[in-house]
Image (cartoon, grey):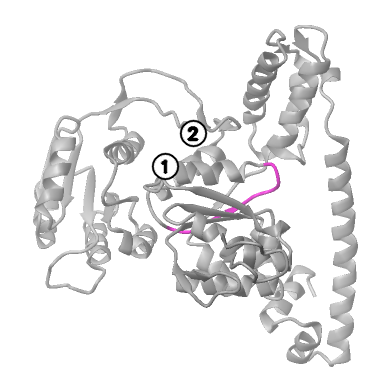
Amino acid sequence: MREIKFRNMILKNANILVIDDDTDVLTAVKLLLKTEAREVVTETNPELIHSLLASTRFDIVLLDMNFKSSINTGNEGIFWLKRIKELDEHLSVIMITAYGDIDLAVRSLKEGATDFIVKPWHNEKLLEAIKGILRAKGKVISDIPVGDKTTIGKEMMGESEVLKDIFLKIEKVAPTDANIFILGENGTGKDLIAKAIHENSLRAAKPFVKVDVGALTETLFESELFGHKKGAFTGAGEDREGRFETANGGTLFLDEIGNISMHQQAKLLSVLQNRQVSRVGSNLAVNIDIRLICATNLPLAELADETRFRKDLIYRINTVEILVPPLRKRGGDIMILAKHFANVYAGKYLKPVPGFDAKAIDKLSQYHFPGNVRELQYTMERAIIMSEGETLSAGDLIFSPIENAVQEASETRDLNLGVVEKNTILKVIEKHSGNISKAAKELGLTRTALYRRLSKYEL
């Protein structure tokens, strides 16, 4: 069960302005906030914004994205957001949006909005968004002083700032239908984040379907994702629905998407554009309704190589990007997780919950964890099984030789490949007397991709 714990907060001396041409929305918000804030002002006409801001000092404005007004550009919310910012650049604005306006809502963040919520919203999420803004303004007080750590699932826990940023993103994007692209090294918890997004979405009651697409062969890719008809190929003894159909109404999580071939990318892009799948061996198109989450352990720089990954597919899957930090960049989270796993495995193996001596803490804190949280988990399980006393020492902590060997081999390979690539580029450019277009064509690269490599190797 996914859990996110925050401090219980109450509002103090907060003035909130709500602007929406739907009177039902205004009534609902006022009923929700009237016992929380000092004053809640509602208005249906955005053209009165100037006079309202001139007469009252507001802490937050809740602003609808669309109005039946004279502006009528299809993005009225952006227009009035800019107007508010011109009048008071420090005023926090939360945009109220419908599902069809998600792209506009994301754009509004770039234009200065603090947050956005999707109709119909969960009251708790709206309150938490408002309290988060007021907390930063010093407009809230704590009614229960607690120090709970923020957690997702059982392994994604911690107090580091980088992790708090991820939790904040999850809170914002989960209620939307925006496609999410999760990037991070192996073992960092990308699947936990995908599940947390699903469980906090309006699709939570529908299926969450995970597919490791990087492990699918060319022959299995279409059958697994799109399904097949009986007799479509050898071994197809019955009709079978694909993962897209299984996830219909819910969330489809495509893990390790960076490893699929260009041919597979083209097939996937077609389905995402048309929102329809056809089973192998059938001409019948089936409509699909899914929320897509993708993940990869490849850095964006590699995905930007057009010879490896289609740029149009990246745009399709990457409405919002979440970069998961490696464990070595999460500071004190290492000990939080180590103690958590120690408790888990002490219970599993019927041993007393151990403490950590100073050298054990130093060893954990200074290790680089190439296998990230997954490696820490296995390290703690091994330590609990093999330890004799009630306190873990540095000698009880044996890190994975496999992870270190893999990292060393990868670093050596990357270095060697870099030298080979640099020398090859130099030879081809010299061959064509510095003509970048001809050199790029022979290398199988676009001019842009070749220029990136020239910059990378300082050529």
**Tag 2 near tag 1, CB within 8 Å:** yes
Magenta stretch bounds: 178-187
Seen at 45% across and 58% down, the residue is: 290
**Element on which disc 1 rests:** loop
Q: In this view, does 16 lie to the left or right of 161?
A: left
Mark linked to residue 200 = 1
Compared across the picture, whether 1 is left or right of 109 comes to: right
**Residue type of the residue flagged with mark 2:** Arg
Q: Report whether residue 180 is seen.
A: no
Give residue 207's position: percent from left, percent from top.
47, 48
Against 43, is 204 above or below? above
In this rendered view, identify the residue nearer to me: 165 or 297: 297
134 horizontally vs 215: left or right: left
Which numbered circle lies on residue 2?
A: 2
What residue is shown at x 50% (from left), y 38% (from top)?
164
- What percent of the width, then of the height, locates residue 315? 53, 69
Residue at 11% x, 48% y: name it.
Answer: 42
Please tell me in which quadrant of the rendered image residue 234 appears: bottom right
Give how far across and how far down residue 391 sits, in percent: 76, 9
Query: Does the rendering let one see residue 206?
Result: yes
Q: Where is residue 400 in the image (x, y as percent from the top left)?
A: 84, 34
- Residue in the image at 73% along x and 90% along y: 437
Assign a secondary structure to mark 2. loop
Disc assigned to residue 5 = none
Dividing the image into 4 quarters, which one contains the C terminus?
bottom right
Magenta span has 149?
no
Which secondary structure class fits the magenta region best? loop
Three-letter amino acid code at the position of disc 1? Asn
- 2 left or right of 39 in image: right
Compute the Cα span from label 2 to label 1.
Answer: 9 Å
